[in-house]
Image (tube, coloured by chain):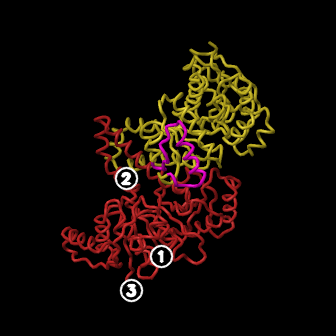
Chain colours: A red, B yellow
Amino acid sequence: MQKTTIAVDVMGADLGPAAAIEGAVQAYIEYPSAKLTLVGDTDIIKKELASISTKYPKHAPFEFDIVHAPEVIGFDEQPTVAIKQKKNSSIVMGLKHLKAGEAQGFVSAGSTGALLVGVFAYAKRQPGIQRPALCALLPTKKGFTLLLDCGANAEVKPQYLLQFGQLGSTYMKSCMGIQNPRVGLVNVGAEKEKGTPTLQEAYELLESSDLNFIGNIEGRDIPAGEADVVVCDGFVGNVILKLTEGLSKTLMGMIKEELKSSVLSIIGALMAKGAFGKLKKRFDYREVGGAPFLGLESLVVKAHGSSDALAFKNAIRQCINYAQSQ
Amino acid sequence: MQKTTIAVDVMGADLGPAAAIEGAVQAYIEYPSAKLTLVGDTDIIKKELASISTKYPKHAPFEFDIVHAPEVIGFDEQPTVAIKQKKNSSIVMGLKHLKAGEAQGFVSAGSTGALLVGVFAYAKRQPGIQRPALCALLPTKKGFTLLLDCGANAEVKPQYLLQFGQLGSTYMKSCMGIQNPRVGLVNVGAEKEKGTPTLQEAYELLESSDLNFIGNIEGRDIPAGEADVVVCDGFVGNVILKLTEGLSKTLMGMIKEELKSSVLSIIGALMAKGAFGKLKKRFDYREVGGAPFLGLESLVVKAHGSSDALAFKNAIRQCINYAQSQ
C-alpha cells in the first residue's frame, strides 16, 4: 500500500518555520504510516531540519520531501491579490501539489483569508458540493461539536446549509466515530418559524433530508453538546468560534487569578491542579489540531496562526486520519 | 422630590408570581428612594404579599400600588397575536402604565418576544432613535460589556448600528459610570473592509461619529473586555448572549466535575471554594439584573425567564439607577 502523503506549509505560521517543521518532525516520528512533504523555502527548511535533528538525534536524518516555495503570504495581505500574484507561495504551491494528487492532505497555519481564496481557486471540490466550508471542532460538555461554516461563506443559501449538514455529518462519522451525528441549525429559538427566510428554508431542507436533524439550536446548546454538527453561515460561525476560544481562555485565566487571591485557595488550587490540567487540555486548540475545510476532494486543515509544534503535529494527524478513513 | 416609580410585571416568570413579588419586597426594603407598582392579578398579588410578609415581619405591611392585570402571556404564544389580543396582560398593562408616565421603569420576566412586540407597540421611543435595542450586560475579564442588539432587530441597517453605539455609550456612562465607553463593532476581522456592506458602512458611520469607536472587534475580544459597548445585529447578538451564558455554565460545571474526580482535588476544591464563589457570582445573570431595552423614553428591563427574587431585585435596582441618572 502506498503511504498517505500530507503536505505541510511551513512558512505561514506566527511562530515562524521552526514550530511547523518541529511539528512535522514529531508527526514523522509518531505516525510512520504517513509520508510528509514540507512546502516552503528549501534553504530555510534544510537549516531548520539540521537544527531540530540535534533535538531528536535517534530519528535523524528525517525523510521529508520538500516542495520549494520561497514566497510567503502575510496576514495583512489582501487575499485575492496575494493568491493571484504569489504563485510561488507555500499556500499556492501546497494546494497545487494537492490538486495534482501528489498529496492527500494539506496543513497550513497561514492567512485564513488567503487559504480560503486559494482553496476556492485551486482545490478540487467534491462532486455536487456548491461551497466548501471551513469547520472547527469545539469542545463541549459531552465531547466535541463540529461547527461549520466558520468563515468561508459569510452569506449562505439554504442549500449550502443543507450541504454543510451533510459534510459535517460525514466528517463526524468517519473521523470521530460518531454513528448517527445529531445536526443542529443555529437560530434564535427552537421554533421552526424562527429566524430569517434563509434559515426557515434551510430548516425545511434539513428536516426532509436523511440527516439526523434535531432542529434549531441556540447559542447555549452548543457548549452543552446538544448537537454533533452545528450548521450556520460563516459570519455567525466565526463569531461562535472566536467567542468560544476567547471565553474559555478568559474564564480559565479568571479562575487562576481568583485562586491566587488567598493562601488557602493557592493551596487548594495546587491540590486540584490535576483536575484543571485535564480541563485545560480539553479546551486547548492545540490538542484538537486545526480547522478542516470540508467539501473538497482532499482534506485541507487550517492550523491556528499561533500554532506550535504540538498543534502542527495534531493537525497533521487529523489529515492522516481523514485520508486513511476515506 | 417625587419618588421614582418602577412597575414590576409579577406574572410572566418561570418561577411564578412568588419570586417576582419577593424580589419586589426585597427592593422595597433596600431601595426606599423608589416606589414600586406591581402589575398582575390583584388576588394573587395580595395572597403572595400576605404570605411573604411573614418572612419579612419587620417591614410588613408593604406599600405597593397594584395595577390589576389578570391575563398572562405564555412563552409559547405567538407574540404579535398575544399582544394584540391580551390587552389585560401584565406586559401590555405595564407598558401602558409606563407610556402614561405613571412609572419611569418597567421590569418583566415574561416572554421576550411578547415584550419586544409590546415595546414596539406601546413604548415611546427616544426622539431620533429608529429602532430600540435589547441589550445584555456580559461579564468580562475587566468588568462588564453592554451587548446590543440581542434580539430586537434580526436584520439591521448601518444607521441602526450607529444608534446602538450611541444608546449603549450613554447607558454605560450613566448607569455604569464609565467615562468614555469604548464602542466596538462585531466583525470577522479587525480590518475596515471586513464583513458585509452593511457592516462596512456602519464602520464608516461609527468612525466619523463622536463616539469612542475602537473599530471592529472579534468574538474573542468580547470576554477579554476590549470594548465597553459591543454593537451587532440582533441575530448575532442573541447567539453571543446565549453562547456566553451557556459556555460559562458548562465550563463551571465541568470544573466542578473534574474537581470531584479525585480525593485530593475535592479537598483542594473545598479550600478554593471562596475563589470559585466569587467567580461564579460574576457570571451569575441574577447579579447583573436584566437585559435593558434602550432607545425608549423610559427603561424597560427584561429579567431572565428563570429569575428568582434576587434577580428581580437587581433588575428593579437597574431601573431605579437608570431613571435616577437621567
What segment is highlighted magenta in the picture? B192-220
User: Which of the chains bears the disc numbered 1?
Assistant: A
Q: Is residue A36 visible?
A: no
| x and y percentages locating residue B142 in the rendered image | 42, 38
In the figure, is residue A210 to the left or right of B99?
Answer: left
Q: Residue at coordinates 34% horizontally, 40% vertically from top-left? A: A257
Query: Residues under labels 2 and 1: Cα distance?
Result: 31 Å
Q: In front of the other: label 2 or label 1? A: 1
Q: In front of the other: label 1 or label 3? A: 1
Quadrant where the N terminus of chain B lies?
top right
N-terminal label among 1 and 3: 3
Q: Residue at coordinates 63% horizontally, 16% vertically from top-left? A: B3
Query: Residues under labels 2 and 3: Cα distance?
Result: 38 Å
N-terminal label among 2 and 3: 3
- Give the residue number, with chain letter if any, for mark 2: A280
Instruction: Tell me if residue A27 comes above or below residue B190 in the rendering.
Output: below
Q: Residues within 10 Å of mark 3 (few under 14, many from 20)?
A: few
Which one is in front, A146 or B218? B218
Which one is in front, A79 or B236? A79
User: Which of the chains bears the disc numbered 3?
Assistant: A
- Give the residue number, with chain letter if any, for mark 3: A2
In the figure, is residue B156 to the left or right of B243?
Answer: right
**In the image, what residue type sits under mark 2?**
Lys
Q: Residues within 10 Å of mark 1 (few under 14, many from 20)?
A: many
- Give the residue number, with chain letter if any, for mark 1: A298
Instruction: Tell me if residue B311 comes above or below residue B246 in the rendering.
Output: above
